[in-house]
Image: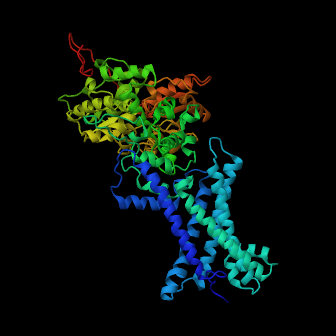
Amino acid sequence: MPDAREIYWNLGHWVVIPMYAGVIACVALVVWGFYRRFRVWRTGRALVRTDDLAGRVWYSVRNALSQRRVLRVSSGGLPHALFFWGLVLLLIGTLLVMLQADLLEPAFGIRFLEGWFYRLFSLFTDLGGLLAIGGLAALAWRRFVIRPKGLVTTADDYVIHTLLFAILLTGFAVESLRIAATELPAGASLAFWSPLGFALAHLFSGMGAASLMRLHEATWWLHLLLVFTLIGCLPFTKLRHLLLTPVDYVFRPHTSRGMLLTLDLQDEATEQFGAARVSDLAWKDIFDADACTSCKRCQDRCPAWATGKPLSPMRVVQQIGEVAFSGSDESLAEAIGTDAIWSCTTCRACEEICPAEIEHVQKIVEMRRNLVLMEGSFPAAEVESAARSVEMSGNPLGVGGASRADWAEGLDVAVLPTDQAIDVLYFAGCYASLDPRNQKVARAFVDVCASAGLRVGILGRGEKCCGEPMRRLGNEYVYQMLAEENVAALSASGASSIVTTCPHCFSTLSRDYRELGLELPVEHHSTFLLRHIDSGELLLDPEPFDCTYHDSCYMGRYMGIFDEPREVLAHAGGTIVEMPKNRLESFCCGGGGGRVLADEGIGTRISASRARQVVATQASSLVSNCPFCLTMFDDALKSLEGDEALQVQDLVEVVAQRLRAPRQFETPVPEQGEVPSAAGVPS
């Protein structure tokens, strides 16, 4: 029984000369093609992404081979992974053949493609071809027959699918013609280790040996020509993502999720802030356009796109690439459209699902920075008014800063600086301080702390807006101004830790403020509550209730906190009816990215769309842990007929209602001319 097949059978070893000449020519073409693109990438601003290079490369290899990010969606994920794994098996098989036939055997007489190893080699290369054909067929069916809404099909797609099918089919044809000519007549059992080739060989069994050999030779050359064509196409078609997506993994940001690049506003040599043109973006932003697979997953997850806004994260990336590679000096705002730029809620759903780890939000914020800082342009008059209020009063709600601590009147709350010892410095944020609905959340938090034996301190009028809404809207100047004042006040407070009930404040204080010198640990009340419940310091009397829980974007996709709020609800007696879009796939309330300050004039309201998802659970209450979400849902649910009974609560309100022997507070009656110390402001 033969235990191997002759490599280059029916051709002769001389074919390696034109074969390697073609490989060299194709590689030269690929290098030239990518060099042309490299010259465009480098027109962007410098950006260093080479720290921990070994770790970055290992991350890329691990994720590319596992297809982990591709498999996260059901539509198209598995077929793409199967196709990729099939190609990997075929590539390994090809390299093994070249290693033996063109190097080890001629130079050293070493043969390893024989015996049991060759039989396994034959089986796995056939399996690789089957996986590749099956995956490609499923992808073609989805693209050309099902045609999902928003999936744009171009001439590239027809060419690439046809070329790939032709390569795979001619490869199997070469194998089956050889088996029909050499193994079927002899009854060789080796043919069984090439199951698809063996099955197809029977189609040619009626042909004579000479005809089989001529057809085999012609098909081999056709197959080789098609492979050369595929290699040469890499830099000039969307196939380039096969190489560039793993490279994009290498250059992914190593900062915390969703952190923005900080502008150096003190650099007097800087004449441009934000991105007016492609050259104002970082090189990675242009590179992302080439790494994009055009799979539209980001678009499918985008709440703005889902509610009729003119924003497609995929198109933003593609339009940046189109402008960059056209050599045009066109304004990005004109190419993409200001309505699209302002529609983004910075929820990061696009980035979380992207198989190439493209950074959509940073690009959009850079364009917003240009509009605000360089052109004085805002999405709407109410946002411009809010920005002025932030500069004058330290908050976007148009309320005087002197009343920032009024919510705490009657509570045992120390206004810092003070000689009184405190356990918790509560950074309330603008909404908990000044919005009547969210002031209830702040008071509930103080009640819960008191029940746990913890005394709360606040900055009072010394606290300013954390600056996050302004920053996400592009106003880096106002953000840094507010941040520096807050960092100084927090650092001078004498507190040992900070707790906030706002995910936006939490994300900003715990990560962004680190760049400005804040060293105090910062915690969100979701984890704070669970920690004190688990320690036994916070005792609850659970009462059974059903609810649905909304994962706010800045708690979930930004900070990775999903389980802790659910555990708190379980301790309180809650049974959660999950919405289909939860955790990483949660649907935004519409308030992020500064959009909480702007009217939603295009399409349907994002909050209304999420509210309908809430109602569909038939739960009696909605629980969140974000003041923006609370505000957006309060308004949205009121607009839905018949849903007045559905209660919207913050997590800490649920806990406060179930405190064991909750502490009762009374407003102290001040003496003549005395101001209650909790207010912390002059009368």
Image quadrant where residue 603 sits: top right
Quadrant in which residue 84 is drawn: bottom right
Q: Quick check: 144 left or right of 301?
A: right
- Quarter of the picture holding the C terminus: top left
Asked if 148 appears above or below 656 in the picture, the reply is: below
Q: Quadrant of the N terminus?
A: bottom right
Give the percent coordinates (x, y) of residue 466: 33, 31
For the image shown, how many numbered marks are present on the structure?
A: 0
Question: Does any portion of residue 396 appear in the rendered image?
Answer: no
Residue 24 in view, yes or no: yes
Choose between 572 and 466: the one closer to the eye. 466
> In the figure, is residue 3 to the left or right of 631?
right
Q: Residue at x 19, y 28 (%)?
A: 418
Looking at the picture, does residue 308 appear above or below residue 71?
above
Residue 59 position in % (x across, y down) = 43, 59
**As drawn, is 186 to the left or to the right of 163?**
right
Q: Position of residue 132 (x, y in %)?
A: 63, 63
